């Protein structure tokens, strides 16, 4: 059974809508709307030694912090929000741009641009699989479905 052009268009639009929804959710998650994204703990110790080499006093300071992409904006663009805040903010913008371009291209039937966003999303997902890549996985998968249906539609024509 060969799918009709109308059913292919429905699948393309549905996959595009799901890519946009998951992309928006992951953008908000990276920005910290659902809680901190990156947490860290640091410890520093200081001590004083006596003349025979034994430590007489030791002071340990433990610092903890959590951050997300919004911390970069709230700190005025500086590093006051933490070391990873600017990185998280940058990746959130990359995700937003990728989903916006891919979603628009798929919705308008631009097959090659959709495939380019799929390749870019797959590369980011593969390279950053153990960190930032998880945020790109679902939007890229839905854009892959949209690109595949657009290719099927073009092949029929």
Image: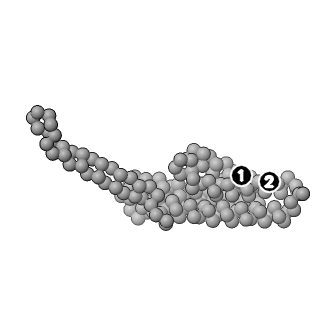
- Asked if residue 147 shows in the view, the reply is yes
- What is the residue that sits farthest to the top in this orientation? 52
- Residue at image position (76%, 61%) is 12
- Residue at image position (65%, 54%) is 140
Looking at marks 2 and 1 on the same chain, the residue that comes earlier in the sequence is marked by 1
Task: Write down the quadrant of residue 82 in the picture.
Answer: bottom left
Q: Where does the N terminus fall, quadrant-wise?
A: bottom right
Q: Which residue is mark 2?
A: 151
Q: Position of residue 55 (x, y in %)?
A: 16, 40
Tell me, what colour scheme is on the image? Answer: one colour
- Looking at the image, residue 113 lies above or below residue 18: above
Q: Which residue is mark 1?
A: 115
Q: Position of residue 118 (x, y in %)?
A: 68, 52
- Looking at the image, residue 53 lies above or below residue 95: above
Near mark 1 (Cα within 10 A), the count class, few <14, some 14-19 or many ≥20, is many
- Residue at image position (62%, 53%) is 137
- Looking at the image, residue 99 lies above or below residue 127: below
In this picture, residue 79 sits left or right of residue 6: left
Badge 2 marks a residue whose secondary structure is: helix
- Asked if residue 76 shows in the view, the reply is no
Badge 1 marks a residue whose secondary structure is: helix
Q: Nearer the viewer, residue 153 or 126?
A: 126
Q: Where does the C terminus fall, quadrant-wise?
A: bottom right
- Residue at image position (67%, 54%) is 141
Task: Write down the quadrant of residue 107 in the picture.
Answer: bottom right
In this picture, residue 42 sits left or right of residue 27: left
- Looking at the image, residue 83 lies above or below residue 71: above
Q: Position of residue 97 (x, y in %)?
A: 60, 58
Q: Position of residue 2 (x, y in %)?
A: 89, 57
Q: Are marks 2 and 1 in contact (CB under 8 Å)?
A: yes
């Amino acid at each position: 059974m060969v799918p009709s052009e109308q059913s292919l268009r429905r699948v393309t639009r549905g996959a595009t809508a799901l890519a946009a929804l998951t992309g928006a959710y992951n953008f908000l998650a990276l920005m910290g709307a659902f809680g901190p994204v990156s947490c860290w703990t640091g410890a520093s110790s200081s001590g004083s030694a006596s003349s025979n080499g034994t430590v007489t006093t030791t002071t340990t300071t433990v610092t903890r912090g959590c951050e997300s992409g919004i911390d970069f904006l709230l700190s005025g663009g500086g590093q006051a929000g933490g070391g990873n805040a600017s990185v998280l903010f940058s990746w959130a913008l990359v995700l937003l741009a990728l989903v916006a371009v891919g979603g628009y291209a798929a919705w308008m039937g631009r097959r090659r641009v959709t495939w380019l966003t799929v390749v870019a999303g797959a590369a980011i997902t593969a390279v950053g699989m153990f960190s930032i890549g998880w945020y790109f996985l679902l939007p890229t998968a839905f854009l892959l479905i949209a690109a595949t249906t657009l290719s099927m539609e073009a092949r029929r024509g």
